[in-house]
Image: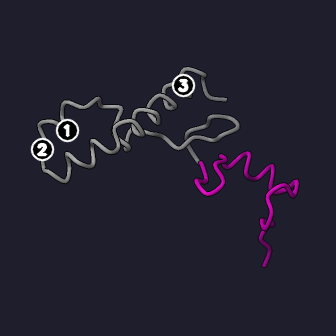
Amino acid sequence: MAKKSVIARNEKRIKLVAKYAVLRAELLKAGDYEALRKLPRDSSATRVRNRCVLTGRGRGVYAKYGLCRHMFRKFALEGKLPGVKKASW
Protein backbone atom coordinates (compact mmCIF):
# COMPACT_ATOMS: atom_id res chain seq x y z
CA MET A 1 0.00 0.00 0.00
CA ALA A 2 1.39 3.36 -1.01
CA LYS A 3 1.62 6.17 1.51
CA LYS A 4 -1.50 8.31 1.65
CA SER A 5 0.56 11.46 1.06
CA VAL A 6 1.88 10.07 -2.24
CA ILE A 7 -1.62 9.17 -3.38
CA ALA A 8 -2.92 12.61 -2.35
CA ARG A 9 -0.09 14.34 -4.20
CA ASN A 10 -0.95 12.45 -7.37
CA GLU A 11 -4.64 13.34 -6.99
CA LYS A 12 -3.66 17.00 -6.63
CA ARG A 13 -1.65 16.76 -9.85
CA ILE A 14 -4.61 15.22 -11.68
CA LYS A 15 -6.81 18.14 -10.61
CA LEU A 16 -4.19 20.69 -11.69
CA VAL A 17 -3.81 19.04 -15.10
CA ALA A 18 -7.56 19.25 -15.64
CA LYS A 19 -7.67 22.86 -14.46
CA TYR A 20 -4.91 24.09 -16.78
CA ALA A 21 -5.52 21.80 -19.77
CA VAL A 22 -7.31 24.37 -21.93
CA LEU A 23 -4.90 27.19 -21.12
CA ARG A 24 -1.89 24.94 -21.71
CA ALA A 25 -3.25 23.86 -25.11
CA GLU A 26 -3.85 27.47 -26.16
CA LEU A 27 -0.36 28.53 -25.10
CA LEU A 28 1.20 25.60 -26.95
CA LYS A 29 -0.77 26.42 -30.08
CA ALA A 30 0.32 30.07 -29.87
CA GLY A 31 3.92 29.06 -29.18
CA ASP A 32 4.10 31.19 -26.02
CA TYR A 33 6.72 29.22 -24.13
CA GLU A 34 7.41 31.99 -21.61
CA ALA A 35 3.82 31.84 -20.38
CA LEU A 36 3.97 28.04 -20.35
CA ARG A 37 7.02 28.20 -18.13
CA LYS A 38 5.09 30.29 -15.60
CA LEU A 39 2.37 27.68 -15.16
CA PRO A 40 2.67 25.37 -12.14
CA ARG A 41 4.95 22.39 -12.72
CA ASP A 42 2.35 19.96 -11.49
CA SER A 43 -0.10 21.15 -14.15
CA SER A 44 1.86 19.16 -16.74
CA ALA A 45 0.34 15.80 -17.66
CA THR A 46 3.72 14.10 -17.63
CA ARG A 47 3.96 14.51 -13.85
CA VAL A 48 0.85 12.38 -13.23
CA ARG A 49 1.58 8.79 -12.31
CA ASN A 50 -0.70 5.86 -13.15
CA ARG A 51 -1.51 4.23 -9.83
CA CYS A 52 -3.43 1.15 -8.79
CA VAL A 53 -6.92 2.17 -7.68
CA LEU A 54 -6.89 -0.37 -4.84
CA THR A 55 -3.39 -0.22 -3.40
CA GLY A 56 -1.93 3.00 -4.80
CA ARG A 57 1.06 1.12 -6.19
CA GLY A 58 2.83 3.20 -8.83
CA ARG A 59 4.72 0.52 -10.71
CA GLY A 60 3.44 -2.42 -12.70
CA VAL A 61 0.02 -0.88 -13.32
CA TYR A 62 -2.17 -2.08 -16.19
CA ALA A 63 -3.76 1.14 -17.42
CA LYS A 64 -6.67 -0.68 -19.07
CA TYR A 65 -7.79 -2.11 -15.74
CA GLY A 66 -6.34 0.46 -13.33
CA LEU A 67 -4.84 -2.34 -11.26
CA CYS A 68 -1.30 -3.24 -10.33
CA ARG A 69 0.04 -6.61 -11.40
CA HIS A 70 -0.55 -8.16 -7.96
CA MET A 71 -4.21 -7.19 -7.77
CA PHE A 72 -4.71 -8.01 -11.46
CA ARG A 73 -3.43 -11.54 -10.91
CA LYS A 74 -5.47 -11.97 -7.74
CA PHE A 75 -8.74 -10.87 -9.37
CA ALA A 76 -8.04 -12.77 -12.60
CA LEU A 77 -7.51 -16.02 -10.71
CA GLU A 78 -10.68 -15.41 -8.70
CA GLY A 79 -12.59 -14.85 -11.94
CA LYS A 80 -13.56 -11.28 -11.09
CA LEU A 81 -12.19 -9.80 -14.33
CA PRO A 82 -14.49 -10.68 -17.22
CA GLY A 83 -12.76 -12.06 -20.29
CA VAL A 84 -9.45 -12.69 -18.53
CA LYS A 85 -8.14 -16.20 -18.08
CA LYS A 86 -4.80 -17.77 -17.41
CA ALA A 87 -2.85 -18.58 -20.54
CA SER A 88 -1.93 -22.16 -21.34
CA TRP A 89 -0.47 -23.59 -24.52
Left or right position of 72 against 24: right
Q: Is residue 8 magenta?
A: no
- The residue lying furthest to the top in this view is 5
Q: Within 10 Å of the Cα at label 1, are there few (<14), some (14-19), or many (20+) other Cα atoms? A: some
**x 55%, y 20%: residue:** 5
**Secondary structure beneath label 1:** helix
Residue 87 is drawn in which quadrant?
bottom right
Query: Label 1, label 3: how many angstroms apart (C-alpha)?
Result: 25 Å
**What label sits on residue 32 in the rendered view?**
2
Of pointers 2 and 3, the one earlier in the residue sequence: 3
Circle 2: element type? loop
Q: Is residue 79 left or right of residue 30?
A: right
Question: Residue 51 lies in what quarter of the image?
Answer: top right
Residue at 80% over, 66% down: 85
At label 1, which amino acid type do we have? Leu
Q: Residue furthest bottom?
A: 89
The quarter of the rendered structure image containing the N terminus is top right
Q: Which mark is residue 36?
A: 1
Per the rendered image, the range of residues in magenta is 61-89
Circle on res. 8: 3
Give how far across and how far down residue 21 sits, in percent.
35, 43
Name the residue rendered at 70%, 37% in the picture: 54
Residue visible at 59% across and 48% down in the picture: 60
Q: Left or right: where does residue 17 sit relative to residue 50?
A: left
| SS assignment at label 3 | helix
Real-space Cα separation, disc 2 to disc 1, in angstroms: 6 Å
**Label 1 near label 2: C-beta < 8 Å?**
yes
- Mark 2: few/some/many CA within 10 Å (<14, 14-19, 20+): few
Residue type beneath disc 2: Asp
Q: Residues within 10 Å of mark 3 (few under 14, many from 20)?
A: few
